[in-house]
Amino acid sequence: YVKSFGVPTLVLGGGGYTIRNVARCWAYETAVLLDKKDIPNEIPYNDYYEYYAPDYELHLTPTPEENMNGKDALEDVRTELLQQLQDLQGAPSVAMQQVPPSFQRAEATEEDPDVREGASKTRSGDGVRKQHPSELYDEVD
């Protein structure tokens, strides 16, 4: 699919279960990337030829296997994996910070919004806001 865009492509691989199967996979994928349609199924003789016994072929013959993974075992693996992911620390070169808790603001009382909690927080210490002569305030009747 990606080749259909006609742009340079870098193909990277991950790990594999066995070295012989990873090598088979990459040999086949490389052939597909290079548009080689008719690659032989027989693996040519090389230093690692013995790895591909007993059939010495590129494509594996699938064998039916019973799924031995029970639901409980899979759930245990899932739980363990999620716990390990939660416990991961960030990479040393990446700045990570704790998210601060939600800010909760105390609601003003309906009694007198000009009176602050804790009278010592004003300069005069009485907890009452002083009106500045150059500011406009609503007149309270």
Image (cartoon, rainbow, N blue to C red):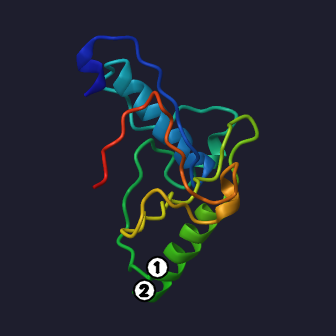
* Callout 1: SS: helix
Q: Residue at x 68, y 38 (%)?
A: 95
Residue furthest toward the top?
7
Q: Residue at x 25, y 28 (%)?
A: 1
Residue furthest toward the front?
141
- Depth order, front residue of 2/140: 140
Q: Position of residue 77 (x, y in %)?
A: 53, 76
Residue furthest toward the right?
92
Q: Which mark is residue 95?
A: none
Q: Residue at x 53, y 36 (%)?
A: 13
Tell whether label 2 touches label 1 (CB within 8 Å).
Answer: yes
Q: What's the residue type where badge 2 is placed? A: Gly
Residue marked by disc 2? 70
- Depth order, front residue of 126/47: 126
Q: What's the residue type where badge 1 is placed? A: Leu
Quarter of image, res 49: top right
- Depth order, front residue of 68/37: 68
Residue marked by disc 1? 74
Quarter of image, res 34: top left
Against 45, is 21 above or below? below
Q: CA distance from mark 1 to mark 2?
A: 6 Å
* Callout 2: SS: loop
Q: Residues within 10 Å of mark 2 (few under 14, many from 20)?
A: few
Q: Residue at x 25, y 16 (%)?
A: 5
Q: Residues within 10 Å of mark 1 (few under 14, many from 20)?
A: few
Q: Position of residue 66 (x, y in %)?
A: 38, 80
Quarter of image, res 63: bottom left
Q: How many marks?
A: 2
Q: Position of residue 69 (x, y in %)?
A: 44, 81
